[in-house]
Amino acid sequence: MGKTSSSWLKGFFAVLKKDLQSEFRTRYTLSALFMFALTTLVIVSFSLGVMEIDPGLHAALLWIIVFFASMAGMARSFVKEEEAGTRLALRLSGRIEFIFFGKLLFNLLMLMILLLVIGPLYLIFMLPPLESYFVFSLVLFLGAVGISGATTILSALVARAASRGTLLPVLSFPILLPILFTSINATRLLFSGSGFGGIHSDLLFTLSYSVIIITISFLLFGFVWEE
Amino acid sequence: MLAKVFLGVAMSVVIYAAFFYAPSAMGLGEKSRIIFFHVPLAWVGVLAYLVSMVHAIKFLKTRDLYHDRMGSFNSEMGVVFTILATITGAMFAQAAWGVYWNWDPRQTSIFVLLLIYGAFFALRSALEEEETRARLSSVYLILAFFSVPFLVFIVPRIYSSLHPDPIINVEGSLNMDSKMFQVFIASLFCFTGLYFWIYNLNSRLIKLKARSGGDELE
């Protein structure tokens, strides 16, 4: 048992390490994520200034930035294998469990780095009223888990398609909508002064939906990855 | 043949009864009669989506392209019926609430349902090779179907909706006049029969085309 679980972890971290290394060399994902997020944030901040806006609007703007930025970044995770011609090598060298969870964790890490920068920047630029920074980070984190969980398999799907860049947001929007719905709602409640107690049902929903989507993606990933 | 004649007669009877036999609901007045068409359309739409997911699962198990074509066809049919349900719903909304569209949770969920299948067709058109297209679009169909229960059953119950909810309401009971109920159930049966008729016709068509030499179907 101990041996199998350690070989599991090894395979899984090998994929993650490989992705992080190639990311460290090219910085493609991170720069796509950051430039997209930063541009949209600056446009929003520029046009609205320090105007006092509705908490609902704050929440919607924040999640629009996060959603489209993550679409720009996540789309790459399998396309780059396809373009570099390394898909076959990756398929031969690793079991699908390692590849799926390795990519998933890589996407989640990228998204968390993005949120670590964009979250504070949004607070600085837009000054939404916020009580608890911890709960705010929790909302962002769970949203990131949901987004990366659903987009990992979808980016593998998109990698095989002809119109790679534009297809991912189209495909993932309907699947991510329940998560965006509850995350926006939780953020809106946070910005209008409620604490953890007020949003815990939204967080629970996001978490359970993410678990369901990740489980189904994992079960279906073999069909995407074969051949 | 007999079944088709029966379906035609039954459909006519239902349409007649919807206007002249069933009483109008209290409070809503004559506009409540749209329930005899709107709800069966929505039901058939969701049924077609469910069947298309079943075909997607069967495709992944058997790798028989027949199931892929049936899955795609059922999604198309689901889109048609869902659009009809959306239109009749918007008509009712205009009559009862004064606006065609107000992002009521029900309207939101049906809109997202349409988006899912719009995305499905976008994915299909972006994949060229037939086997890959069948495999990947089946995966998407199964994945997407898991957000449907959330949208159709959970979201309208969490967020307050203006939608009248006589079928599976919170208490799980029916508050409908018995004459209305008869017509309603008959209408559900007729529309389901219509669906299976179309399903059967197309299934035979696909099999015939496959036998005659597997020419391009789409």
Image: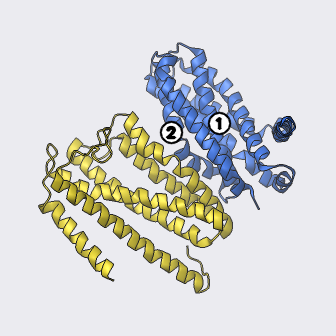
Chain colours: A blue, B yellow
Name the mark nearer the viewer: 1 or 2.
2
Quarter of the image with the C terminus of chain B is bottom right
Residue at image position (29%, 56%) is B38
Q: Mark 1 or mark 2, which has the lower sequence index?
A: 1
- Badge 2 density bin: few <14, some 14–19, many ≥20, Cα 10 Å: many
Q: Position of residue A65 (x, y in %)?
A: 58, 33
Identify the chain of the residue marked 2, using the numbered disc in the image. A
Let me know if residue A206 appears in the view: yes
Residue A178's disc number: 2
Under tag 1, what secondary structure?
A: helix
- The Cα–Cα distance between marks 1 and 2, rounded to whole angstroms, is 23 Å
Residue at image position (30%, 60%) is B188
Is A26 drawn above or below residue A113 in the view shown?
Answer: below
Farthest residue, direction top: A131
Identify the chain of the residue marked 1, using the numbered disc in the image. A
Is B111 drawn above or below residue A122 in the view shown?
Answer: below
Mark 1 — residue?
Answer: A36
Question: Which kind of residue does numbered mark 2 sit on?
Answer: Pro
Q: Is residue A160 left or right of residue B19?
A: right
Are the residues flagged by discs 1 and 2 in contact, CB closer than 8 Å?
Answer: no
Q: Is residue B193 left or right of residue A17?
A: left
Q: Position of residue A194 (x, y in %)?
A: 47, 16
Is A23 drawn above or below residue B185 in the view shown?
Answer: above
Q: Nearer the viewer, residue A159 or A143?
A: A143
